[in-house]
């Protein structure tokens, strides 16, 4: 029978040393969780940039996005670097001017950064519709997420999917209901994410014959 450490046992020096050792061995060390905690930037076990989404979603998506895919993301950062390694093209919209300047200065060659001031239900959520192409994967991980999901539907390829991070949050549920009403199915990946220790979810909304072969 498995034994679970009690709170009082953690106060014992030997038990506390054992817990702290997970920084160099065990699951959290293997996935780079402590790398993120130290650097305050999401990284894998080798220090490579990863998105601030659930580890289960990262495991799922990293082998499914291909060079023939075009990705659009609401929000930018290490996720931009991560997706640019996998996809043929990444377009990101960012509402924070300082953050935009930082990421744009070191963006990969196959990525495009767009700055757009945030106005709820304004130009920001409609930015993928202004592109001269449609997208295979649209990542919703910025602001105004319900409106972003609503507008993203019309910017998808026929086999395109929408990814909504923090889909467990109740105020994003109108987006879930809207997409499901349009015929999308939901695949949810729950668990911990880089540097964080609370349960969260990242959901993929897809239709038949989707580009991720779900």
Image (cartoon, rainbow, N blue to C red):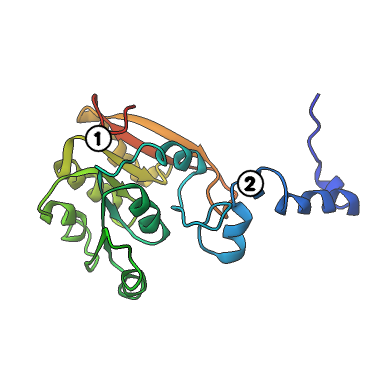
Residue 133 lies, in percent from the top left, at 12, 49
When asked about the image quadrant of residue 100, the answer is bottom left
Is residue 174 visible in the rendered structure shown here?
no
In the depicted structure, whether residue 179 falls above or below residue 89: above
Count every numbered label the image shows and give the total.
2
Of 88 and 162, nearer the camera is 88
In the depicted structure, whether residue 30 falls above or below residue 100: above
Tell me the element at label 1. helix
Of 156 and 86, nearer the camera is 86
Horizontally, residue 73 falls left or right of residue 53, namely left
Q: CA distance from mark 2 to mark 1?
A: 35 Å
Q: Which mark is residue 179?
A: 1
Is residue 105 visible in the rendered structure shown here?
yes
- Viewer-nearest of discs 2 and 1: 2
Residue shown at 36%/71% (left/top)? Answer: 99
Residue 52 lies, in percent from the top left, at 46, 53
Residue shown at 13%/55% (left/top)? Answer: 131
Residue shown at 35%/60% (left/top)? Answer: 76
Horizontally, residue 133 falls left or right of residue 200, namely left
Near mark 2 (Cα within 10 A), the count class, few <14, some 14-19 or many ≥20, is some
In the depicted structure, whether residue 200 falls above or below residue 119: above
Q: Which quadrant: the C terminus?
A: top left
In the depicted structure, whether residue 98 falls above or below residue 71: below
Residue shown at 28%/31% (left/top)? Answer: 206
2 or 1: tag closer to the N-terminus = 2
Horizontally, residue 29 falls left or right of residue 121, namely right
Residue 91 lies, in percent from the top left, at 24, 56
Q: Which quadrant: the N terminus?
A: top right
Residue 130 lies, in percent from the top left, at 11, 56
Residue hosting label 2? 30
Q: Which mark is residue 16?
A: none
């Amino acid at each position: 029978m498995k034994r679970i450490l009690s709170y009082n046992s953690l106060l014992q020096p030997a038990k506390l040393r054992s817990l702290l050792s997970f920084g160099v061995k065990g699951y959290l060390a293997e996935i780079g969780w402590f790398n993120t905690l130290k650097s305050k930037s999401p990284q894998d076990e080798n220090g490579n940039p990863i998105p601030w989404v659930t580890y289960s979603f990262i495991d799922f998506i990293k082998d499914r996005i291909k060079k023939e895919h075009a990705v659009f993301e609401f929000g930018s950062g290490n996720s931009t670097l991560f997706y640019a390694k996998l996809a043929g093209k990444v377009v990101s919209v960012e509402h924070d001017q300082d953050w935009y300047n930082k990421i744009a200065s070191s963006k990969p060659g196959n990525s495009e950064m767009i700055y757009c001031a945030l106005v709820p239900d304004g130009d920001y959520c409609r930015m993928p519709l202004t592109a001269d192409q449609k997208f295979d994967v649209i990542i919703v991980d910025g602001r105004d997420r319900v409106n972003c999901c609503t507008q993203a539907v019309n910017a998808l390829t026929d086999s395109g999917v929408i990814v909504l991070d923090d889909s467990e949050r109740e105020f994003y549920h109108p987006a879930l209901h809207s997409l499901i009403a349009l015929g999308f199915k939901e695949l949810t990946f729950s668990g911990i994410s880089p540097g964080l220790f609370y349960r969260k979810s990242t959901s993929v909304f897809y239709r038949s014959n989707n580009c991720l072969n779900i």
